[in-house]
Image: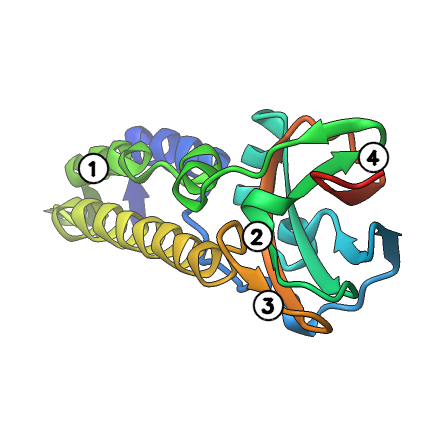
Amino acid sequence: MKKIFIQTIILLSVLLISGCASTYKAINPRQLYYTAHSSRDGVLISYKYNVLQEKGNKKFAKKELRRGMQIIAIKLTNKTDRTINVRKDLIFYAGDNPIYPMQPVDVKNKVRQSVFSYLPYLLLTFTTVIFSNSSSEVAVPVGIVLGPGITAGNMAVAATANKRLLSELNEYNILDRNIGPGDTVFGIIGVHNSGYGPISVRLNNGK
């Protein structure tokens, strides 16, 4: 017969509610199917909202929602006869309101998983399981392995997921990209409070 201390039940209940760390699934904007498009001043933009949620990055997507921001996959095609620098020459709009893409590290810091939030798992270190029979009881301190193991595992998963998110944001950072005539680039941008309005781009000197 096996009896488990009540503290184990309580701790496991709390930890199940708080959840575990999640891995990061790449957005891969080159492979997405874009249904929303806008063209102005010779620049065509295709875009897609909710890419974190769609790819199964639920923890990041929840942070995105709580922080009042959107991470958007985009595809830009330069149909003009001159090279365009995204930062200098383009203004992004959501509806009629200008929006300003954030630097990759700022986007990551807004939606990242908190590595240290998994430290409470260390409380499982004090978990003991009692094995008993008709003549004796043996206390086994399973928490010595369980607590540090679960804590370290979740912290490692969260930290790795954050790094992979930042790596992809850097890979598809188009803010300083030059787009030659007829060229197409893919990117991931993070913006504050776009309201999920239709995205468009205009040249700084566009009419």
Q: CA distance from mark 2 to mark 1?
A: 25 Å
Proximity of marks 3 and 2: CB atoms separated by less than 8 Å: no
Q: Residue at x 76, y 54 (%)?
A: 47
Q: Return the disc, 3 or 1, that comes first in the chain's sequence.
A: 3
Q: Which amino acid type corresponds to the residue marked 3 in the rendered image? A: Asn
Q: Return the disc, 1 or 4, that comes first in the chain's sequence.
A: 1
Is residue 38 found left or right of 149 in the rendered image?
right
- The residue identified by callout 4 is 197
Instruction: Say above or below: 144 vs 102.
Output: below
Is 73 or 116 nearer to us in this picture?
A: 73
- The residue identified by callout 1 is 122
Residue 34: x %, y % from top left: 81, 63
For disc 1, the neighbor class at 10 Å (few under 14, some 14 to 19, many from 20) is some
- The residue identified by callout 3 is 28
Q: Return the disc, 3 or 4, that comes first in the chain's sequence.
A: 3
> SS of the residue at dot 2?
loop
**Dot label at residue 57:** 2
Q: Nearer the viewer, mark 1 or mark 4?
A: 4
Q: Nearer the viewer, mark 3 or mark 1?
A: 3
Is residue 47 found left or right of 39 in the rendered image?
left
Q: Which amino acid type corresponds to the residue marked 1 in the rendered image? A: Leu
Is residue 167 found left or right of 3 in the rendered image?
right
